[in-house]
Image: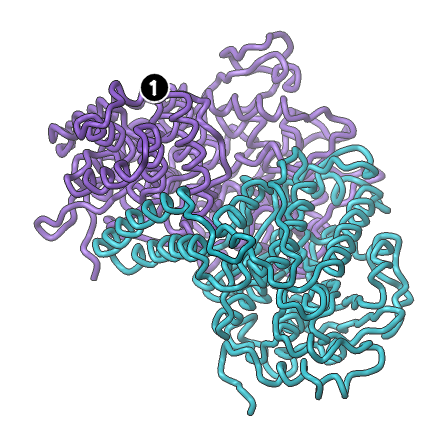
Chain colours: A cyan, B purple
Amino acid sequence: MKTTQRGKIGRRRLLQLGAAGLATAPLWNRGRSAAQLGGGAKYLLVFHTPGTDVDAWAPTGSSDTSIAFSEMTELLEPLRSDLILFEGFDSLGTAGQHGAVGGLTGSTDWNNLYSLDQFVADRIAESGVRTPIRSLILGSVPGEDQRSFWQPGGNPLTPIASPRSAFDAVFGTAPPPPASDGEPAEADPLAERRLRSLALLEGEVASLRDRVGVREANKLGLHAESLAAIRARIMGTSGGAGGGGGGGGCAPGSAPTDTDSDLTNSRLQLDLAVAAFACDTTRVASVQFGHHQNTQVALPGIGTPGNWHNDFMHSDPAPRRRLIEVERWLCQQFVDAGQRLKGLPAPDGNGTLWDQTLMIWTRDMGDGISHAGDNMRFVISGGAGGYLRTAPGGRYINGSGAPHLRVLLTAAEAMGIEDFSGFGDRNLSGSDRQAVEGARA
Amino acid sequence: MIRLSPLLLCALFACEGTIGEQVPDVLVGADIPEPETIECEGVGEPMLRRLTSVQYRNSLVALFDGDESVPEGEVLSDPARLGFRVDAAEAVIRDLGAQQVMNHAEAVAAWAVEQKLGQLSSCQDPSPECRQAFIGRFGRRAYRRPLDAATVRAYEDLFTAEPTFADGVEAVIATMIQSPHFLYRAELGQRRNGFYHLDDFELATNLAFTLTNRPPSDALLDRAERGELQSPEAIGEVFDELINTDAARQNLGEFAEGWLDVEDLLGRAKDETEVAFGPELRSDMLEETHLLFIDVFESNGGLNELLSADYTFVNGRLRSHYGMGGGGDTFERVELSNGRARGVLGHGSVLSRHALAFLSSPVMRGYFVRERLLCQELPAPPAGIDTNIEPMEARTLTTRERYIEHSENPACIGCHTLMDPIGFAFEHFDAYGRFRDNEHGMPVDATGELTLDRNSSEGVPLDGLDSLSNVLAGTEEMEACFAHYLSYYAYGVEGCGTDFTPATSLRDHLRGVVLADHFRMRALEE
């Protein structure tokens, strides 16, 4: 039976992830175990950065089954056999500026801004999967205007910039683990206090909702949902392994210390995202590195510290050494995250986290130097439950001007979503609203 | 939303092509299209406005008698819109937001009990009177109104569930900081005669936050409790008291930065290869603008004075940058010299913020005048064109000549005729805000034209920045536009009417904001 109603994880994907799908997969796809493929758990890790120097990034000489890395991208080498580099996809005017809203949404319709991570998280929730946190949005630069992540209705979502704050928010209310003898954990006075407090707060929010109009009630509704989610996390009723980590890889460790470097903080956030996956605390995590206007970069090996946008993109002359070095550093973070995923068991015990995760490197725009979105670039990797068609030499796909929405839809499809209604530019149709054919195994 | 002339829209969208200087880099980088948000026609709807991150911090400090050592935390974020971070619609608490507030509230409560228990409660015994006194006193500040009996009982239940007095205090503080009555400014009112009328406590709260970005003082809450704030006269009295505080001056300066769209000057791209333009100098420029705005405000001047002031405030670093010489670390009022233009348009903050990294930009400056001073909103330039301007190796043309050259292209003229003729009047000032009478030895031509009526081809001739300031200062368009931005800054929504007349002083503009109907009442929802 094929389920096509909006929001359901497609039956076809479940079948595809099963043995039948494995039988038709090309040899390059190096077969995952049937047990793992049938597990169904899928994780999406969005790695979001500003636009770049397209000439320096371009993997000139690449072919469908072989990547010719540029100096800027060569540190992706350890993941080569699981990589697909996408180039030549057109944002169709949605991502031609720094901080453009179309990078992750494929749209500029203010009433229809729905970023990939949120679309996927909502569909996962609608399919009945419950985790303590619906989606995690981390990184960026605190205090700056945030316009990358969106829920429909015009509300931009703000990443948590502080690793410490994020750690406390993600793991701070997890219920205590059972005692070693299997008995329930002893009562936690702090959790009990929090529940009493929540009861009072939820009552106040509800009371206020009765006094206001629809718009303000909706605002308070978001607040009420946020409080209810805390309650569920405290009580351990929010689904997922929720801190137990059935696969054995759940080990949040101690809270990280915030640093003075926003990019270093984002790297710590990437660790946190992986840790949250390992505990099945969330299925969707996004980490934004830097801000499109105001990111001070001071990292070893980068050169003289400066502003990513102002100095590295628009003051340094070609070949823009500092921009190349920042991108190389980002490649290393992407690879490191992949390696950590490979080293952790999946929460459901089916293989590793890597096997179940799709990693996608997205940007707010294509050409950050000349402000253009007609040549968007993406990096996709991860086991992705066997979705990706890979090659030992890596894969390169040139969109030849196809909408960049198609790459975003590829990520959504890899997560098991078939119905893309409500996502991206609604004026597009036909193949413009389909995943990239050549990416699929 | 500010309405855009159809003529202007048509002309701008006609601008296509790939000519190098067509759309400046910095313009594209910053002016991101923004969504439509709440509008009100005269009087808006009842609202709950989430505190900004600054107001949240100021409120915590006020809870503990001004103690600035209250723990910091990444809690609330403030979406930016129109150069401000006050939008009533976009500021919400969602997803992990309540969790972040909870974590921070618990940290603050633990700090308070450890550091200030004795100050928070003169008694620490298990009697009902003792805990009720604490709950009532602390709750009045946190909720910005006295707690009703049911709320006191709810907090007593929280308190008595704890093993010790200190634990009870900690639980109460942590919860009150998370309360929607603390996190939101209520503008709900009581229904009477067809409208919702804000009560005294709501008025006290909104007066304090609007004018000082801080919560109401105990004294102001006392006045509210006595029911003294309902009349326009009483609101005017509070206005006069609060506006003469340092907090109000700081708030005025922040409004000026947002209105003039210079709030991000510290982070703007500037070529510092040949010109020192570090953060200290940029901060000085913002301080100059703060000081002039406050000076005009406090001397009951209006936009005319703000645009025509023949004096400014500079320190030694800024004097040196302006070529004026002298001065020390402190800012002093000085008469203008060395070619400096009059008023705020002649400030380094405005001139350098509305310019490219290394080149003055008639486009950006004309755009600034249209959007910020006349409220003639312009859409973002077409995407997909190279917006960089390469430095000119052979310096054979002035900036003006470079812009005129490419503006002659039929594909571009529609855009540039709306902005460039205004921007040319700024041409005596380079990308760093320094005066020049020549570029590479070629004389500067600062003549231009301002068409106030967009349906008319007849413009007012300009020659230099002072002439532009003179024309703008007397216009009804600029007076209304200023009122528009000021009311948005105060209300968090656009379009609510304020009371002003031509040549209103800045002080009376702001007084009009707190005396306007929207400040005191709300319309019933349809």
Q: Is residue A14 visible?
A: yes
Q: How many marks?
A: 1
Q: Indicate the position of residue B399 as horizontal and vertical percent values.
A: 70, 39
Q: Position of residue A228 (x, y in %)?
A: 38, 56
To which quarter of the image does residue A87 belong?
A: bottom right
| Residue at x 58% of width, y 76% of height | A417
Q: Nearer the viewer, residue B161 or B336?
A: B161
Q: Amino acid at mark 1?
A: Thr
Tell me what residue is drawn at x 29 percent, y 33 percent. Answer: B142
Question: Is A27 rendered above or below residue B205?
Answer: below
Circle 1 residues within 10 Å: few <14, some 14–19, many ≥20: few
The structure residue drawn at horizontal position 63% and vertical position 36%, both measured from the top left corner, is A257
Q: Quadrant of residue B394?
A: top right
Q: Which residue is mark 1?
A: B245
Residue at 11%, 53% (x, y): give it: B194
Where residue B157 sits in the image (x, y, percent)?
A: 24, 41
